[in-house]
Image: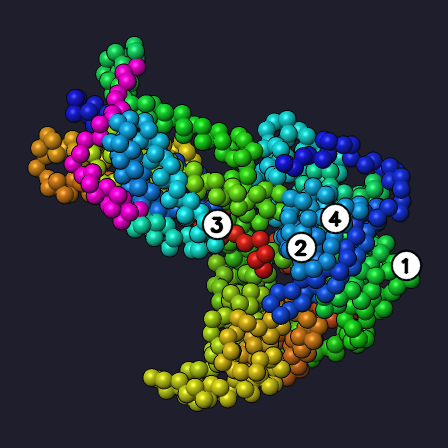
């Protein structure tokens, strides 16, 4: 029983950064821009968040710095793909490589150091005293508590506001949106940059909040899982959040199983989230192909007003 | 931010057009080039309140370029546009909308996954919601459109999509309405309905420009006409006193139009292709529903119908590319020529050279190749012969195919497909988007091969073309044959009705 409760608790913590990164990618993709650079933006967020925390001894300033860093890297993607209409796939891969290299360079002197500032769990009064679920659900940090509200907020933004209508139009039919007077380029720039901010925050969550240390390549491919989660969640923020938590659980199970000494190679256990990703993608994709739900029609296509 | 002009001020009501001769739109000297092709060459145009003006011209005459400049999609090289005396900022769709200019594009520019309401309010202050839905429904009812504000756009018929595109402009209170080939996708009865709406709108004080290349429509609908040829205005006058022949001479530039007329009849021989209750499923609907078709040597069978009624499936089944799920296809032709509707996607390889494209049917012959290599000089000499015979506009057989114009592409396709003297020819939309010379060449080739003894199937949206060429006419509607006529008993009006799924029964 304790084993499973621990797994759920760890799963929630591990799922949170995945959710932030995936929600950010969702915003960009809803505007029609695929950004495969999530992993790179997460690493930059992780290193910048860590450095700012060490320098200021304030973890919240560190998280803010990570948001700015992720957004800054994403703005490169925006300029290249929206402004100059470079192929989005190629540019996204470039961004991942750039982020990995740049973060290793920036973080060179920070490996093995302690961050100084901390973000601690805030047990919610009364609720955290509930038997069984109290400690599992209501003894976390503020970023965990915020994530469901952010997912619901993004859902409302997309489906219940003018900005959301314009965002969807830019991702579905940019030509129709432009002809209707929607500032397609502005929307796409904004969506990509905001999405990058989310990825930066997700990266810093690993370095500043969860492991409280910096190591090269520490996000370990979770940026790619975040991209897969957007597809798994059929571009719906609520489903994406649920998916992120499930993946977080599978990811956490790996550590839990290792700690209780399951007689399976730790390398095989560490593969679980990725195998799970593969299985889920196959299932989702066959469903998508049949019903074509969710996927923005102009995803990945640059928009040019005078194209003939 | 764009305001919803309909809410800001009352929409003009019937009879409220107080100043009858006020100029609302003034276009002066618009020039727009693409590379070294001048699409618009110092074009002038004026539009008065309550006026319906036709913009007439052949494909490629520059009509669509001009309206793309008017709605801010294209930035003109030079020239000015003024709306009610105020200059319009060039290259800005938002500025054009704010000035009251609205375009119903040929492809409608709607978002299929959005509801009717979402499509209507896109670009205004609003995002939708219950109240706005009611407002949109009210506007639709006022315009006489039976649109459900909650229906997704993908579920609408073509006629409804067009109503939605018009409603979008009316909701915003735009009063300079530009319709780009509005009747191209409509059946004759639907077109009549559209004309009714257009008259009502003009009567209410709005001004309308509609683009067409159909003379009949200009005479029926327009007060004034501007005729474009090769990007230049060749006529700008009132329609009264002009007849179809005069207009076509202005449009085409010679009296070639007068020579068009019914071609001679063919002499049908044995059956080369027979389809028996051929059925094809596509995307959950019947793309082709128990279609029977017989094609004899020496006859042209025309298939009339509005695009999207099973033409693609019929063409591919007839050509033997697609296997029907039920029914049979019997074909005794030794060579089948297929001229697909999507020339570059299905017919030719854009990234390869003209000569490579021309040899695609013949490169495996011993005269052309050896199992290990291709005699490239033989390929080139074949290409030179065909370039000459079909007047393909290239100097070098090795030039890239994709650089050719629409007419050039179709000539390459015809040359490749017809060189083997096929017994059966399937031609889908063979003259769509072509200039007059290329169209005439395509038609004379089809007639020539019929006279040689080939069976020909011509699938076309252009009813005039079908009636001119065919020995027999089938009408396709929702994947089924809904009418069959022989030469001599062609009834234009009845065929038109059947194309729209109506007609006497």
The alpha-carbon separation of the residues under discs 3 and 4 comes to 30 Å
Q: Residue at x 76, y 35 (%)?
A: B142
The alpha-carbon separation of the residues under discs 1 and 2 comes to 28 Å
The alpha-carbon separation of the residues under discs 3 and 1 comes to 50 Å
Q: Give percent across and percent down for residue B207.
A: 80, 47
Residue A151 relative to residue B96: left or right: left
Residue numbers of the magenta segment? A99-124
- Do tags 3 and 1 sit on the same chain? no
Q: Are marks 3 and 1 in contact (CB under 8 Å)?
A: no
N-terminal of the pair, mark 1 or mark 2, is 2
Q: In the image shown, does A101 or A137 lie closer to the viewer?
A: A101
Q: Residue at x 70, y 62 (%)?
A: B31
Q: Give percent across and percent down for residue B394.
A: 58, 80
Q: Are marks 1 and 2 in contact (CB under 8 Å)?
A: no
Q: In the image shown, does B466 or A4 lie closer to the viewer?
A: A4
Residue picked out by circle 3? A82
Residue picked out by circle 1? B240
> In the rendering, which numbered label is found on residue B68?
2
Image mark 2: chain: B
């Amino acid at each position: 029983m304790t084993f499973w409760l621990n797994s759920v608790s760890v799963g929630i913590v591990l799922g949170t950064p995945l959710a932030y990164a995936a929600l950010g990618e969702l915003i960009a993709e809803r505007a029609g821009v695929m950004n495969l650079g999530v992993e790179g933006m997460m690493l930059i967020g992780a290193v910048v968040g860590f450095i700012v925390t060490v320098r200021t001894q304030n973890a919240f300033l560190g998280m803010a710095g990570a948001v700015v860093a992720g957004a800054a890297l994403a703005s490169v993607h925006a300029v290249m793909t929206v402004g100059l209409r470079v192929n989005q796939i190629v540019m996204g891969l470039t961004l991942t490589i750039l982020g990995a290299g740049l973060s290793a360079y920036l973080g060179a002197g920070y490996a093995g150091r302690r961050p100084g500032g901390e973000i601690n769990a805030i047990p919610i009064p009364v609720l955290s005293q509930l038997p069984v679920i109290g400690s599992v659900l209501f003894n976390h940090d503020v970023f965990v508590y915020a994530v469901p509200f952010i997912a619901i907020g993004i859902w409302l933004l997309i489906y219940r506001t003018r900005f959301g209508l314009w965002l969807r139009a830019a991702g579905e039919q940019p030509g129709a949106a432009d002809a209707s007077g929607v500032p397609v380029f502005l929307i796409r720039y904004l969506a990509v940059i905001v999405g990058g901010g989310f990825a930066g925050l997700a990266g810093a969550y690993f370095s500043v909040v969860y492991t409280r240390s910096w190591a090269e390549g520490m996000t370990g491919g979770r940026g790619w899982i975040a991209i897969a989660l957007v597809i798994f969640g059929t571009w719906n923020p609520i489903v994406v959040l649920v998916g992120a938590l499930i993946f977080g659980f599978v990811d956490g199970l790996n550590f839990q199983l290792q700690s209780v000494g399951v007689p399976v190679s730790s390398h095989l256990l560490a593969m679980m989230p990725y195998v799970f990703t593969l299985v889920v993608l196959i299932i989702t994709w066959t469903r998508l192909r049949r019903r074509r739900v969710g996927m923005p029609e102009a995803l990945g296509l640059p928009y040019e007003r005078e194209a003939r | 931010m764009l305001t919803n002009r309909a809410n800001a001020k009352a929409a003009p009501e019937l009879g409220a057009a107080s100043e009858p001769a006020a100029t609302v739109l003034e276009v002066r000297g618009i020039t727009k080039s693409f590379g070294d092709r001048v699409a618009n060459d110092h074009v002038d145009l004026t539009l008065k309140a309550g006026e319906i003006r036709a913009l007439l011209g052949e494909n490629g005459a520059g009509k669509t370029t001009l309206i793309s400049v008017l709605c801010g999609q294209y930035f003109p090289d030079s020239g000015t546009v003024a709306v009610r005396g105020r200059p319009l900022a060039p290259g800005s769709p938002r500025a054009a909308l704010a000035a009251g200019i609205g375009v119903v594009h040929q492809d409608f520019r709607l978002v299929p996954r959005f509801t009717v309401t979402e499509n209507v309010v896109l670009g205004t202050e609003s995002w939708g919601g219950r109240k706005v839905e009611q407002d949109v429904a009210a506007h639709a009812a006022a315009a006489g459109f039976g649109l459900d504000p909650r229906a997704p756009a993908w579920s609408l018929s073509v006629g409804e999509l067009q109503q939605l595109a018009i409603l979008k402009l009316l909701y915003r209170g735009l009063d300079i309405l530009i319709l780009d080939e509005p009747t191209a996708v409509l059946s004759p009865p639907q077109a009549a309905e559209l004309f009714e709406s257009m008259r009502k709108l003009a009567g209410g004080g709005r001004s309308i420009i509609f683009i067409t290349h159909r003379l009949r429509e200009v005479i029926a609908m327009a007060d004034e006409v501007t005729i474009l040829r090769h990007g230049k205005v060749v006529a700008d006058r009132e329609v009264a006193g002009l007849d179809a022949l005069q207009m076509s001479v202005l449009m085409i530039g010679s009296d070639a139009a007068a020579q068009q007329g019914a071609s001679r009849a063919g002499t049908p021989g044995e059956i080369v292709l027979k389809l028996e209750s051929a059925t094809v499923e596509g995307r959950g609907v019947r793309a082709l529903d128990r279609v029977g078709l017989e094609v004899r040597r020496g006859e042209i069978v025309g298939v009339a119908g509005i695009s999207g009624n099973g033409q693609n499936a019929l063409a591919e089944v007839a050509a033997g590319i697609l296997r029907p799920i039920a029914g049979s296809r019997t074909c005794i032709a030794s060579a089948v020529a297929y001229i697909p509707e999507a020339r570059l996607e299905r017919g030719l390889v854009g990234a390869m050279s003209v000569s490579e494209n021309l040899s695609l049917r013949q490169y495996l012959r011993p005269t052309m190749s050896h199992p290990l290599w291709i005699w490239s000089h033989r390929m080139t000499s074949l290409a030179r012969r065909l370039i000459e015979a079909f007047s393909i506009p290239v100097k070098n057989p090795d030039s890239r195919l994709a650089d050719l114009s629409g007419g050039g592409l179709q000539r390459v396709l015809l040359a490749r497909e017809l060189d083997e003297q096929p017994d059966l020819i399937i031609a889908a939309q063979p003259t769509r988007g072509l200039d007059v010379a290329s169209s005439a060449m395509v038609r004379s080739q089809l007639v020539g091969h019929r006279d040689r003894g080939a069976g020909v199937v011509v699938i076309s949206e252009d009813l005039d073309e079908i009636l001119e060429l065919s020995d027999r006419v089938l009408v396709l509607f929702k994947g089924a044959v809904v009418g069959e006529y022989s030469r001599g008993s062609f009834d234009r009006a009845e065929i038109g009705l059947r194309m729209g799924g109506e007609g006497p029964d």
